[in-house]
Amino acid sequence: MFDQLPDLLALLNDILEAVIVIFGSAVVLYNLGRSLRDPVMRAFCGLIIFVVVAYLAELLVSRTIVSASVEGFLRFQWIGIALVPAAQFHLSSTLLSTTGALPNRRRFLVPLGYVVGLVFLGLALFTDFLVTNPVSNPLASLAHLEAGPIFPVFAAYFWLMTASSIYNVWRARQRCITRTTRQRMTSTLLTYLAAPLGVFPYLLVISNAGTGQAVIPLWLWPIIILGNLVVGLMFGVLTAHLAYFGTASPDRVVRVRLFKFMARVPLAGSIVLLVYVLVSRNSPILGLPAETALGFSLVATVMLVEWAIHAYKRPLERLFQLNNDPDVRTIQRLSERLLTTRDLQQFLESILAATCEALRTPTSFVAAITPEGPQLEAVVGPLDEPGEIFQDADWRQLAQTAEPSNGNSGDALEAVGEFFVWRNYWIRPLRSRQHELVLGILGIRARSDEPDLSEEEDEIFGRLLNQAAQALEDRILQQEVFAIVEGLLPQIIAIQQRRSEATFGGLPVLAQKSPASSPVVSDPDFNMMVRDALTHYWGGPKLTTSPLMRLRIVQDAMAQHENNPTKALRAILNNAIELQKPEGERNMTTAEWILYNILELKFVQGQRVRDVARRLAMSESDLYRKQRVAIENVARAIGTMELASQDGASDEQ
């Protein structure tokens, strides 16, 4: 048993290294999109990649069964070892610049660090000056290279760059003013040794201190395992605090996204890996072939992990203080209880089915009253063409008393008691709770010339009418709230962006002067100009003669579009539309995608209003209301681009 202990410790170390590789790769994937536009994330992803390369190579060396491949993997490991110091200094420089410190000498030191790292990498890959022939530990199967003559020079460079990096982060911490940013930078400073501690080739030093082959003593294995464990925890803390850089989302949103991603991707992968190792080593004990045991155990593990994340998501969020704000909890409850268009249709269909059953009629329907006339919401049973049913009637009469009106926009409805008789239908208005507004109508196919409901039928029908009216009223109130929120959304996004930029930028960001407004942008009819240009998106006088042609961004874009102002303006409109596109996979009916879908379907694809409304599962009146908000957002985006262009031109001057 004692003889097998080194092998067990080596296996445990391999598992820990594999977990670090999995989590490191997941961190890079998680931040890959932001790394393209944010310097902090770009530098951090570079650092993580080099660390992952170093750990992956070491893991491959321990699993290699062909001795000829050992040296190749050991030299491949130096891609990470040689470039970690430069990447670490690069990250510290971007963190310091984020707090407002000017780069000055650092703008030259960062590329110089990468150049020196590449020189050491070349020496490690193609010569024996830095590292030389591999050494294999016969006791624990731990292989490594021997130190070459200039290895002390590399070690000095490695720790000098590390010390400089820590000094830069310390300076960044000193420049932080708010408590939150100071706490984050303090945690970053305390965990900044994770990369150098994890990748520095200590075994080269041990090998040089010994005589020939390095024999790793048994007591050193717990130290190696503990060191890897500490490094993994430090990287976790570093990731958790650097995730806030380069995003305009609130801190709570960043925490929740990071938590969900880490739970579903690297944590699940690590658990599956652990189960694989345990089952593959013990499958004979279970009395099953290795393939069968592995198949069942891995599938069961994936299912159980996903189930646990789904079932205990809310308790875990509370445990880790995610989404713990009372306002957020209120919004979550509202999101679970929203009355969507489909929910309304299902409820109204249930009411109509009950109406048909109670009144013994084959057809009933509910229509909402809109400025354009009645809009059918739900129907049960065979119904004539709605356009023919609703045409030629003076539906404004419903907003008045039960007395017949002499409306001149259509034929008067025949009032019989509380009903209006129109063609083959009995119609009752659906009023708001205060009975001040007619929200819609509920119609049933007539079973006789005049309404002849019994007292019991009239009582049941009254209850059903009230429920249908309340559903319509609640939907209208909800849509009004959505319209207000959607109108405020650009301002909220702007404030969040400003908050994100000012978190570490402070006074320079908050006190910067706003550029002067463009005459076109400041025109009171600017939104109408944008709407007209969108209506003729693929050509027409409202696009070719649009006043938007005078915008600086359109003039600047002409060089990229064959000096054609129409194509340039269309490109600007398309860019503004794309700015309304949310992150993630496109969905036709979710609230966050509605505005972008309206713009893309209505103007870019040129579909009819009726087709767009049907595809987005909304009424045409609701579509027009949301379209107005979407156009306002596009106009605001174009105005922002124009002001940014003017600001850039003034800086160049």
Image (spheres, helix red, strand yellow):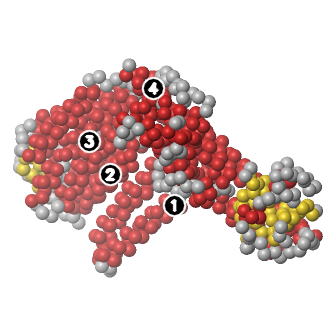
The amino acid marked with disc number 3 is: Leu
Q: Position of residue 473 (x, y in %)?
A: 76, 53
How far apart in space, not on screen, are marks 3 and 4 (Cα)?
48 Å
- Which residue was labeled with disc 4? 646
Q: Is residue 112 left or right of residue 446?
A: left
Image height of 516 relative to 268, above or below: above
Label drawn at residue 197: 3
Q: Are marks 3 and 1 in contact (CB under 8 Å)?
A: no
Q: Position of residue 300 (x, y in %)?
A: 42, 70
The amino acid marked with disc number 1 is: His
How far apart in space, not on screen, are marks 3 and 1 (Cα)?
36 Å
The amino acid marked with disc number 2 is: Ser
Q: Position of residue 318 (x, y in %)?
A: 55, 50
162 or 526, nearer to the observer: 526
Query: Which is more foreground, mark 3 or mark 4?
Result: 4
Tag 3: Cα neighbours inside 10 Å, few (<14), some, or many (≥20)?
Answer: some
Q: Is residue 122 left or right of residue 110?
A: left
Mark nearer the N terminus (4 vs 1): 1
- Which residue was labeled with disc 1? 310
Residue 492 at least partly seen: no
Label drawn at residue 25: 2
